[in-house]
Amino acid sequence: MAADALELARPAPPPRARGTEGQLIYALGDIHGCYDLLKSALAQIAADAAVEARGRTPVLVLLGDYIDRGPDSAKVLQALVWLQRRGDLMLRLLKGNHEQGLLGFLEEPEQGQAWLDYGGAQTLVSYGVAPPDAGAGPQAWREARDALLDQLPASHLQLLGELELMVLVGDYAFVHAGVRPDRPLAAQTEAELLWIRRGFVDAPGPFERLIVHGHTWQSEHPQILEHRLGLDTGAYATGVLTGARLDGETVHLFQARAAA
């Protein structure tokens, strides 16, 4: 995976004067076990922040769905643990519906088939755990859960338990999936923040703040609208991981791409 210089796109059209309260913010879309793409994106961010920070501590907001579907979920979570320990950036980690699925499997393994069906099998394999066969009974699911707990570092479990649902900075609200347009931000439910599509992506806006989100992707191109910025570009399928630098009224996009 190439770690090229930060690839900047034209600024998104500003719906109104907006700002980041003087903070330099980087946001990154859904990673889904694509560790090499994450490494490339982080290298781009580090090179860019060396120029743009100007004495500020960069804020890195990751929009959730770190695991499942891609091959290296365990390595991605370990990278996030490492990022948490760095003193040269402020890391804000949002919870995605796929992290919710993993946590649900740990609590109720008998319901694990639904998680495996949308990418959990790849996460189990990344920790060296064999997924149960289709149609396996409850005991097989409990054994898979116990095997995962044996392999899951305490630091990974702690990280998963501390994920945030929303981050507010200046005129921006960062969430995983989106928001219900008819509710104030303070009244959004966890289910809405982690799962919403219809009613959000087709809403004309404006919202209470400009929403930066992941969860819903259409192609390798981010969704840039006046009221929302969708950074999920289906990294596990397209080989493209998308992020944004937000600084004052400026929005610049960047992408890490899988080597051809």
Image: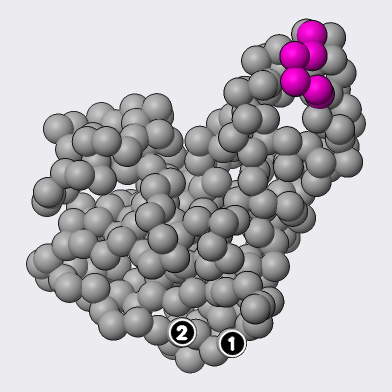
Identify the image quadrant of the C terminus: bottom right
Q: Position of residue 42 (x, y in %)?
A: 60, 73
Q: Position of residue 19 (x, y in %)?
A: 23, 69
State the extent of the magenta-drawn residues as a range: 132-137
Q: Residue at x 18, y 32 (%)?
A: 183
Q: Are marks 2 and 1 in contact (CB under 8 Å)?
A: yes
The residue carrying mark 2 is 7
Q: Residue at x 48, y 91 (%)?
A: 51
Q: Amino acid at mark 2?
A: Glu
- Name above or below for residue 251 compared with residue 61: below
Q: Amino acid at mark 1?
A: Asp
Q: Position of residue 202 (x, y in %)?
A: 20, 44
Give the class, few, some or many, for how many residues have Cα within 10 Å of label 2's Cα (few <14, many ≥20).
few
Identify the image quadrant of the N terminus: bottom right
Q: Position of residue 18 (x, y in %)?
A: 18, 67
The image's mark for residue 4 is 1
Which sits in the foreground, 10 or 248?
A: 10
Q: Is residue 85 visible?
A: no
- Name above or below for residue 150 compared with residue 127: above
In-image side of 136 versus 234 (left or right): right
Q: Secondary structure at mark 1?
A: loop
Magenta highlight: main SS: loop
How far apart are the alpha carbons under marks 2 and 1?
8 Å
Residue 102 sits in which quadrant?
top right
The image's mark for residue 146 is none
